[in-house]
Image (cartoon, rainbow, N blue to C red):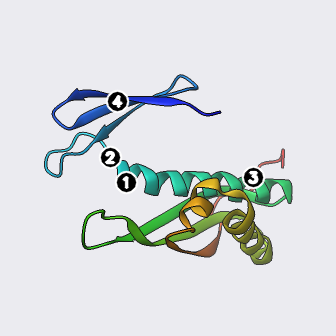
Amino acid sequence: MMEAKVKWHDNNTFIGHSGSGHAVVFDGNKDNSVAPSPMEMVLMAAGACSSVDVVSILQKARQQVVDCEVQLSAERAETIPKVFTKLHLHFEVTGFSLSEKQVERAVQLSAEKYCSVSIMLSGSVAVTHSFSVKESALKPSAQQ
């Protein structure tokens, strides 16, 4: 079982405490916010979850990945509740002689099998994925 708690701090600011002992600030203010909104956190959670998968899968495939960034975009319903209706994750993966097929496979495996967050959201949200591969400007280190 996973547990967490969220406590009101002030105004529309809340502090979440994870069962693993970490804290994060949420802000429901539209103007002058001091932290991400809960929906922004969901969006970033989808990106973080799938990025962990993509990097891990590429490393297990012995790909020399040096950077992975995911650009996320989401559309929301016009009326309350303003749920996500569409979510797109675009991965920009950088490395040395990366196999485009391996990157495509990693993104697909995350989308279809491993990323709990995006798979959970895909039950009610149109989730799409894309990727691009860049060659690293740096030379690989001798250890690799």
Give whichever of 103, 127 is nearer the camera.
127
Query: Of the residues shown, which amino acid type is indicated by label 2?
Result: Pro
Quadrant of the rendered structure where residue 138 is? bottom right
Residue located beneath label 2 in the image: 36
Q: CA distance from mark 1 to mark 2?
A: 6 Å
10 Å crowding of disc 3: few (<14), some (14-19), many (20+): some
Disc nearer the start of the sequence (3/1):
1
* Mark 4 touches mark 3? (CB < 8 Å): no
Which residue is drawn at the image coordinates 49% and 71% (left, top)? 125
10 Å crowding of disc 4: few (<14), some (14-19), many (20+): some
127 horizontally vs 52: left or right: left
Give whichever of 74, 90 is nearer the camera.
74
Question: Does residue 88 appear anywhere in the picture?
Answer: yes
Question: Which is closer to the viewer, label 4 or label 3?
Answer: 4
Which residue is drawn at the image coordinates 25% and 73% (left, top)? 78
Residue located beneath label 4 in the image: 15
Residue located beneath label 3 in the image: 56
Q: CA distance from mark 2 to mark 3?
A: 27 Å
Residue located beneath label 1 in the image: 40
* Mark 1 touches mark 2? (CB < 8 Å): yes
Which residue is drawn at the image coordinates 55% and 26% (left, top)? 19
From the top left corner, tell me how far across and down residue 53 is, in percent.
70, 55
Question: Looking at the rendering, in which quadrant would you find the N terminus?
Answer: top right
Query: Of the residues shown, which amino acid type is indicated by label 1?
Result: Glu
From the top left corner, tell me how far across and down residue 13 is, in percent.
24, 35
From the top left corner, tell me how far across and down residue 37 is, in percent.
31, 48
Q: CA distance from mark 4 to mark 2?
A: 11 Å
Disc nearer the start of the sequence (1/4):
4
Q: CA distance from mark 3 to mark 1?
A: 24 Å
Q: CA distance from mark 4 to mark 3?
A: 30 Å
Q: Height in image: 56 above or below 88?
A: above
